[in-house]
Amino acid sequence: MANIKSLKVNEPKNRLQGAHPKIGIRPTIDGRRRGVRESLENQTMNMAKAAAKLLTENLKYADGLPVECVIADTCIGGVAEAARCAEKFAREGVGVSLTVTPCWCYGSETMDMDPLTPKAIWGFNGTERPGAVYLAAVLAAHNQKGIPAFGIYGKDVQDASNTEIPEDVRQKLLQFAQAGIAVGEMKGKSYLALGSVSMGIAGSIVNEDFFQNYLGMRNEYVDMSEYVRRLEEGIYDKEEFERAIKWVRENCKEGPDNNDPKVQSSRQRKDEEWETVVKMTLITRDLMVGNPKLAALGFEEEGLGHNAIASGFQGQRHWIDHFPNGDFMEAMLNSSFDWNGIRQAYIVATENDSLNAAAMLFGHLLTNTAQVFADVRTYWSPAAVKRVTGKDLTGLAKDGIIHLVNSGSAAIDGCGQQTIDGKPAMKPYWDITPEEAGKCLDATLWRPASLGYFRGGGFSSDFMTVGGMPVTLSRINLIKGLGPVLQIAEGYSVELPRDVSSALDNRTDPTWPTTWFAPVLTGKGVFTDVYSVMANWGANHGAFSYGHIGAELITMASMLRIPVCMHNVSEDRIFRPNAWGAFGTYDKEGSDYRACENFGPLYGKK
């Protein structure tokens, strides 16, 4: 059993340079004095306060700190007050803009003109004043000026005195704000490539135009020889290492060695590999976010880190042909807990697949949970399973399954041992109990690496995801002449009978973590059957996040101007800027492509 006595939840902390993006709320108002504006001041400002209350009570940043809202000092009745608000928002670090109003206002005079900030307008649905008229007018101004905005309007008429936020409005406010915060969190941060291209994998050919123009990020690079330098020169916190290796020996159970006994590493060699992979974990974290203790040791530059919100480790093959693999390092950093307690997960992509790192980052910022990196490895049809095992697939698996498996780098939160309302889940770190973290550790074996793949040894995590967990698989791909596209597949983890699971898993590599995935079928397009989902997946990797977050991913992608090329999200959940309707309302997938191409990447120039 894992030793959880000292496993405490860490206090929220922003570990990166740069303040979190705040949500700016702009109460706009009819500027006519001598009775009109005066009668609306309280209602309008109270609408802004109600929105701020909703957002601050329901949203947190991924590090656990509460989301902050900034309200304009006064209602905005014209361009002068709009300018004062813009100045305040710039001073306060606002990264998401929400305009609210119950009435008519002067459209282009009161609108938010910042082209780089995701923005929405909530027009109150009441008969006393024409909030809907202003909403339509200001959205038209946004569209005409090429500054897309989301329109929020309740389905049911409310009385002017009603201060409650209807459920449909509430859902859109939260969906917009969470996506906008995620966009703002990436801006100015780094993607750190640890090494270069792994085995010719396209995703590890880091495309700076994508990160800079679409995500507002910068790119940083460190050769893998830096690990050798830091290992040999002791550029890591040695006190933390002693604590970490002790914790690992107590909590990370080593599993059976599947290598031929003739080539298996000795016990001494394995112990040395454990020490190396733990040190690699410390080094990777320090490279990403820095470590003041390094400065105290005389390594001031190394102590700063690269302000990396995400990273990727090349590993194969230039590292792993000689040194222990990066599986432990990646898995532990991607998980929500280690020897320092329960804390925010890091984002570290296997094989430096920067595009899968982007998908992991999207999921992490939208859900605040750990993400699972996986190969989209094999489609198992019901007929193939029957032939191999003699058993029929049933339940969620009845139409076939996709084997999500990688060499052991998946966050061990992905085993599904955390729970929400008694059902398997992956939770934000601040909601994870020590007992749940212990169960994840107990459900994971660390198997000596397959020496055919990893000549330098190391350890791969091995777990089987429990069934019934709602998950969303996603992936960014780059297409020549088109740019980035996003793929989304909502579905469920599936638990197969032990003998069936073993028979299928053993055909690949039983020392790696496995998730049997059943996408939700809609009967339309590529989601007509599971085979088509697999056949249309755009790369060898994918990332899955807890929950059905396809709608949130679509909203976020529209802010960044990344079209979605496949998804199984119902139309009633899709929320994009108002301008998207001008590019066609019948074929929404096509209109998404046209709108993204027209407006261009959020931080790029058309």
Image (cartoon, rainbow, N blue to C red):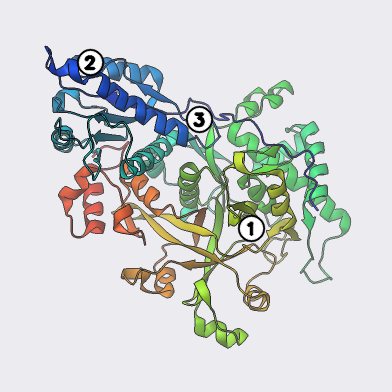
Image spot of residue 422 (x, y percent): 61, 55
Of 34 and 281, the residue lying toward us = 34
SS at mark 2 in the image: helix
Question: What residue sits 15% from the left and 30% below the top?
Answer: 129
In the rendered image of this protein, does residue 325 appear above or below residue 333? below
Q: Which quadrant of the structure image shows residue 514?
A: bottom right
Q: Is residue 431 left or right of residue 170?
A: right
- In this picture, is 203 found above or below 369? below
In this view, the mark in front (3 or 1): 3
Q: Residue at x 45, y 34 (%)?
A: 185
Distance (Cα) linking label 3 and label 2 = 28 Å
Residue under pointer 1: 415
Mark number for residue 492? none
Dot 1: few (<14), some (14–19), or many (≥20) neighbours within 10 Å?
many
- The residue carrying mark 2 is 81
User: The disc labelled 1 sits on which kind of residue?
Assistant: Cys
Under mark 3, the amino acid is: Pro
Q: Earlier in the sequence, mark 3 or mark 2?
A: 3
Q: Are marks 3 and 2 in contact (CB under 8 Å)?
A: no
Q: Where residue 377 sits in the image (x, y, percent)?
A: 53, 68
Secondary structure of residue under mark 3? loop
Can residue 323 be seen in this snapshot? no
Find residue 50 and report its horizontal and vertical position in percent. 35, 29
Q: Residue at x 55, y 45 (%)?
A: 369
Q: Which residue is mark 3?
A: 66
Please name the amino acid that badge 2 sits on: Glu
How far is disc 3 from disc 1 in space, using C-alphas?
Answer: 28 Å
Asked whether the beta carbons under mark 1 and mark 2 sit within 8 Å of each other, the answer is no
- N-terminal-most mark, 1 or 2: 2
Asked whether, in this view, residue 445 is left or right of residue 469, the answer is right
Relative side of 237 to 595, left or right = right
